Amino acid sequence: MKSNQQKITALYCRLSQEDELEGESNSIKNQKSMLEKYAADNGFGNCRFYIDDGYSGVSFERPDFKRMIADMEKGEIGTVITKDLSRLGRDYLKTGTYIEIIFPQNDVRYIAVNDGVDSEKGCNEFIGIRNYFNDFFAADTSKKIRAVQRAKAERGERIGSKLPYGYMKSEDNRLVPDPDTAPVVKRIFDMYVNGVGTRTIAMTLERDKIMSPSAYAYYKYGRKENGLKLNNPYLWSDVTLRGMLVNEVYIGTTANYKTTTKSNKLKKQIHNDRKDWLIFENTHEAIIDKSTFEMVQKWFAGRRKPNKSGKTDVFAGLVYCADCKSRMYLRRVLKYPKENNYLCKTY
């Protein structure tokens, strides 16, 4: 079995948007420089950096933190060093669990340089208090950010961090059509209006080598999003297309507070009722005209379904019975296409 000196010395760095507000002292570059010097001055060898840039300390679902813990559980890590306790985490209960239970169980020495914490020298009675204040700081910062976001939302400013496919940001931080992807958005709406189902649209875009929104965001901005498949960047999903076809952003509308979270520790998004949304029209240049968008919404309400050939009824949701006013549905006769007709759903 390897001794702790033979094992990896994990130098863990973390930076979130909240931490960036405190200035250069918490930058990844500063953390790396400090930890590297501390390790060299104190005889720690076999050093390996684990870096989470852009991740909140409230959550422990951070990719490099999880990679570090996985290496620890394999018995490869002997020491974990951070700049301070808040780099490890800002949830005082979970941070305390790692320091007092998980690290000792795995025979891992933990050091927080600026806070004077070294598990080999015994527990510091102020660790719990420091962790609590780190947690309090995160909650207080979150509260302030929510207040700022609420004010922006009420002014009609877009508060979502994710750029809608088809748009880019101008120098004054406004949404403007992206010359590369706005034509693709128009094409998707045109195809759907002309009776092409989402499955066929997805296959057509893949055939024409048009990158999916997640792949485009990755290659243009270096941003990783859910659904990213680098092995097939041209793979479009029905869910993505349906989400685009009902998104009011394409007619120049900003809709804020579609979702919310209960607290800074619970990241699960809760969908709000439409009556609770903050909706502002004509906040940016539209890609799709309103008549086309409204037609698509009617077809969605009519539950358009493609037939075996992938085609859909272009009048779905628009034809109603003259007698009972109920919706009418296309009855397809594949053998005799000229005999196709509409039937009332109550017939």
Image: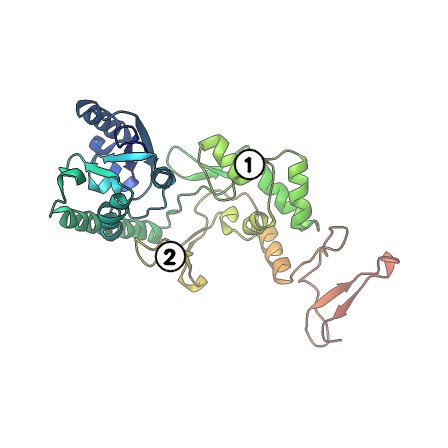
Q: Which mark is residue 260?
A: 2
* Mark 1: amino acid: Thr
Q: Is residue 162 above or below residue 318?
A: above
* Mark 2: amino acid: Thr
Asked whether 277 or 45 is in front, the reply is 45
Q: Is residue 316 above or below residue 137?
A: below
Residue at the far left in the pictured view: 125
Which of labels 1 and 2 is toward the front?
A: 2
Residue 252 placement (x, y as % from top left)? 48, 47
Question: Which residue has dot 1 on it?
Answer: 181
The quadrant holding residue 332 is: bottom right
Please tell me which residue is depicted at 19% across the width and 51% down the height of the picture.
136
Please tell me which residue is depicted at 23% across the width and 35% down the height of the picture.
82
Q: Sort mark 2 into few (<14), some (14-19) or many (20+) by Cα contacts within 10 Å.
A: few
Determine the CA span between mark 1 and mark 2.
Answer: 29 Å
Asked whether residue 166 is in view, the answer is no
In the structure shown, which secondary structural element does the residue marked by tag 2 occupy? strand
